[in-house]
Image: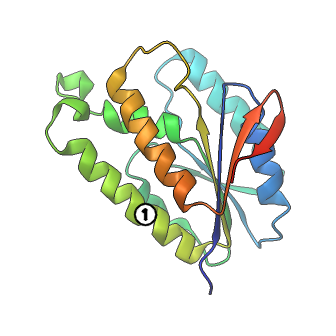
Amino acid sequence: MARGSMIFISGGVRSGKSAYAEQLVMSAGAVRAVYLASGQAHDSEMAERIMRHQEDRSGHGWIAIEQSVDMEKALPKIHSGDAILWDCVTTWLANELYEGWERGIPCAERPGCMEAKWLELQVTINAMRNQAQLLVIVSNEVMDDFVRDETYQRWLGKIHKWFAGEAEQAIEMENGIAYRRK
């Protein structure tokens, strides 16, 4: 099978990224539409949001894979020719960057920790593309926001640049309108 296409979609919160990405995946004509979700329910608001997303997808042909960290663990669940929607990079990054915070030693503060996670993610994304027909990656654009966490934004910028460079298409969503940047 030929290497699958990759589309990277970024934009502000509630800009229409996920809905647009869902349309792309559902119209790909793949045997399976896979929703790779990275959310973790750390509070009641997030638990409610995750439940709402799961309800929205149920009965619409989606195969759900919940993978909040260690994205490589999703690989055995990916079938040849799948169309995959990964939603979203920003949630995954927060999960990985701050893994271990409850013990007082988040990954962000352990030398080489995030670098290793980033290299593993690149390998995983390439493996997914070798399996899938289409990989659509969604991420929030937070670079224009007031800097609250420079480490997070530095990593997100690095990751976004790589995804945009590797993808056949890079799309920015704004107010429900898709702007193709690449």
Q: Residue 76 location in percent, x, y?
A: 48, 69
Using the image, determine if residue 127 lies above or below residue 152: below
Question: Where the N terminus falls, by quadrant?
Answer: bottom right
Left or right of 173? Residue 69 is left
Using the image, determine if residue 57 lies above or below residue 12: below
**Seen from this angle, which residue lies furthest front?**
181
Q: Give the image quarter of residue 30.
A: bottom right
Q: Residue 170 location in percent, x, y?
A: 66, 51
Left or right of 115? Residue 140 is right
Left or right of 31? Residue 84 is left
At horizontal 25% and vertical 52% (from top left) the residue drawn is 116
Q: Give the image quarter of residue 15.
A: top right
**Is residue 61 visible in the rendered structure shown here?**
no
Using the image, determine if residue 101 lies above or below residue 93: above
Q: How is the image coloured?
A: rainbow
**Seen from this angle, which residue lies furthest left?**
111
Q: Residues within 10 Å of mark 1 (few under 14, many from 20)?
A: some
Using the image, determine if residue 138 lies above or below residue 124: above
Front position in the image: 112 or 33: 112
Front position in the image: 122 or 91: 122
Q: SS class of the residue under badge 1?
A: helix
At horizontal 49% and vertical 47% (from top left) the residue drawn is 161
Q: Residue 152 location in percent, x, y?
A: 38, 28
Left or right of 23? Residue 122 is left
At horizontal 78% and vertical 49% (from top left) the residue drawn is 22
Front position in the image: 76 or 158: 158
Q: Amino acid at mark 1?
A: Thr
Question: Where the C terminus falls, by quadrant?
Answer: bottom right
At horizontal 37% and vertical 32% (from top left) the residue drawn is 154
Q: Which residue is mark 1?
A: 124
